[in-house]
Image (tube, rainbow, N blue to C red):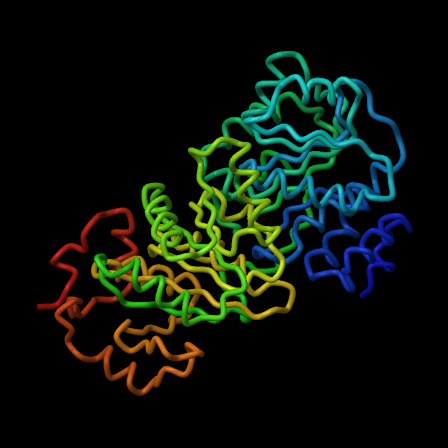
Amino acid sequence: MSFEKLGLCSEILKSIKEKGYVNPTEIQERAIPQVLMGRDLLGCAQTGTGKTGSFIMPLVEILNTGKAKSRMPRSLVLAPTRELAMQVSEEFNLINKHLRLQMALLIGGVSFVEQDNKLAKGVDVLIATPGRLLDHIDRGKVILKDLKILIIDEADRMLDMGFIPDIIKINKLLPKIRQTLFFSATLSNEIRNIGENFLINPKEISISPHSSTSSNIESFLIKTIKNNKLNDLRKILNIEKVKNAVIFCNRKVDINKVNTFLKKNNFKTVCLHGDMSQSSRIQSLEDFKDGLAKILIASDVAARGIDVAGLSHVFNYDVPINPEDYVHRIGRTGRAGLRGKAFTFCEDGDEKNVLTIEKLIKKSIQTYHFNDINSESTDFKNISSEQNNQKIKETNTKFKKVNFLPIENFLNFKESGQIPNFLTKK
């Protein structure tokens, strides 16, 4: 199906064509007609499937007629992080290029005065994080009683970050009669139950009902030890043909450590984490997107807010504690039909988290001991799989050889620290 058959106006189609989009993605093809019909929507799609476009395109089409009033937005898009809100605003500006709809972006770290002035003029689309929106509401700068469309993006991340009470508070200020679009990268029973409080007879569209990784991504698990991890990271960066890469760390202190180390080794890097000022975060993202920095070192707060065309590599400096974060981290690469690679460094003691990831994605990750990697190699896949398999079977003094009981036992201890002794065979 082409975009022309989705019922979008010529101005939107022109913007889409100028961007280089040829055909709608599956979520766009299935969601856009339902939104244009005025249906409430419960949408689930894997990261990188064009989910943002699936609600921005019909939103612009619907709002193309009518006029906004001062402090009374006609539509509201809620996103969990500043980076995600900025990404949605960029998509809106792209689709709205040949139209005249007004948009305001309400995120922390930006002057209230500038945002107040924008709201006073009247906006058709209000894109905001929950906390910043409530600040404006408490100050009397936003009135939601004339809202026509509510869009909640990344609902599962909202849940993880504790924003659901804020969303419920905002929902009580909205008119009962409205259209609501509820999007999530994953669709657990808890997310469904939350969605029931916002939606009326919704159309459910699920592109990827279970967390999975794209077939365009080659994933590798690298066995290493803590004291060698930085040098091992540098070694793989030199082996691989890295066009641009994101390195994810579990802790902010490691972000600074990795950044300092790579800069000393002549890599062009920038950081992104929650303790940075808004201006610094924006500058880091712009430098990375413009190619001034080849590597972005980030925390999970930015995992779903990074949208860089043609990202070639993702590196997990640490195994993610939450298996869903693994899916969202590596989902930054392998987009738009391109191939990508994802490397995850695994230390002794990470076996439990690796098992929960493999359980979630329903496949094993290729595993290599770092001693098998030849620094002269120009292709990581040239490593002998036979040699690697033999190496993994050997007892290595750097890694404990443990025979595990079934995976279900470890899922029961997901939040615990060390694996209990009674879950291992003697």
In the image, farthest residue toward the left:
426
Q: Nearer the viewer, residue 274 or 297?
A: 297
**Corner quadrant of residue 149:** top right
Q: In this view, does 116 lie above or below 251?
A: above
Q: Where is residue 71 in the image (x, y as percent from the top left)?
A: 74, 18
Q: Which of 346 and 28 is in front in this view?
A: 346
Q: Which residue does the image show at 83% across and 25% down from the upper left?
A: 68
Q: Which residue does the image show at 42% across and 45% down from the upper left?
A: 299
**Corner quadrant of residue 107:** top right
Quadrant in the picture for the N terminus: bottom right
Count of numbered marks: 0
Q: Which residue does the image show at 44% across and 40% down from the upper left?
A: 273
Q: Which residue does the image show at 32% across and 76% down from the upper left?
A: 373
Q: Is residue 341 above or below residue 116?
A: below
Tell me if 300 is positioned left or right of 66 in this view: left
Q: Nearer the viewer, residue 24 or 288?
A: 288
Q: Position of residue 386 (x, y in %)?
A: 31, 87
**Corner quadrant of residue 40:** top right
